[in-house]
Amino acid sequence: MRTFTPFRRWMLTTFMVLACPILTGCVGMANAKAQAENAVDRFHELFNSQDAAIYERADPAFKKTTSAPELTSFLRPYRSRLGTFERVPEHGQWLVNWSTSGTYVTTAEDSVFSQGTARETFVWRIDRSGCSLVSYTISNARSPDTPANAA
């Protein structure tokens, strides 16, 4: 049987005190990422059905920057040019930030639509009430009729 000296006991205690928050943070990060991925899936379902619920479910910060008609006007050309969302061939970049106003998850993915591709970037805020859209950008939209030098 091995006994611990006070120094070894202190080292073990210190290690446990430092390791627990790191492990908890990793679990929290994985949970936040999973919630954001589910929210992206819901966004694409609403995008495909051209449902106004995208705006209704958005974060108050999102609603301060745009109105429902503005969001519809913004999405309409992408929906008509790219078609319906189909898939994300490979999950892209993501970043998790914690703050006093919630956990923010940023995801950037190259998405495939029925008539083209585009780079989508989402920022989600996760708090006790759920996961809500804070920001959405779409760029590098390409369709078969898009010229090679167009952005």
Image (spheres, rainbow, N blue to C red):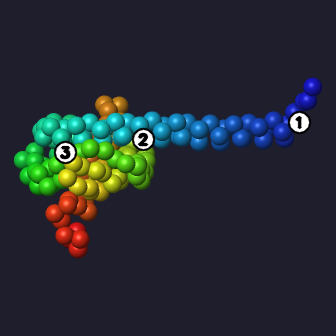
Q: Amino acid at mark 1?
A: Thr
Q: Position of residue 11 (x, y in %)?
A: 78, 41
Q: CA distance from mark 1 to mark 2?
A: 42 Å
The residue lying furthest to the top in this view is 1
Residue drawn at point x = 62 percent, y = 36 percent: 20
Q: Nearer the viewer, mark 1 or mark 3?
A: 3
Q: CA distance from mark 1 to mark 3?
A: 66 Å
Helix, strand or loop under label 3: loop
Residue drawn at point x = 16 percent, y = 63 percent: 145
| Residue placed under numbered mark 3 in the picture | 84
The residue lying furthest to the right in this view is 1
Q: Can you say which quadrant of the picture contains the N terminus?
A: top right
| Residue placed under numbered mark 2 in the picture | 33
Report the side of 121 relative to 68 (left or right).
right
Q: Position of residue 90 (x, y in %)?
A: 40, 49
| Residue placed under numbered mark 1 in the picture | 5
Disc 1 or 3, which lies upstream in sequence? 1
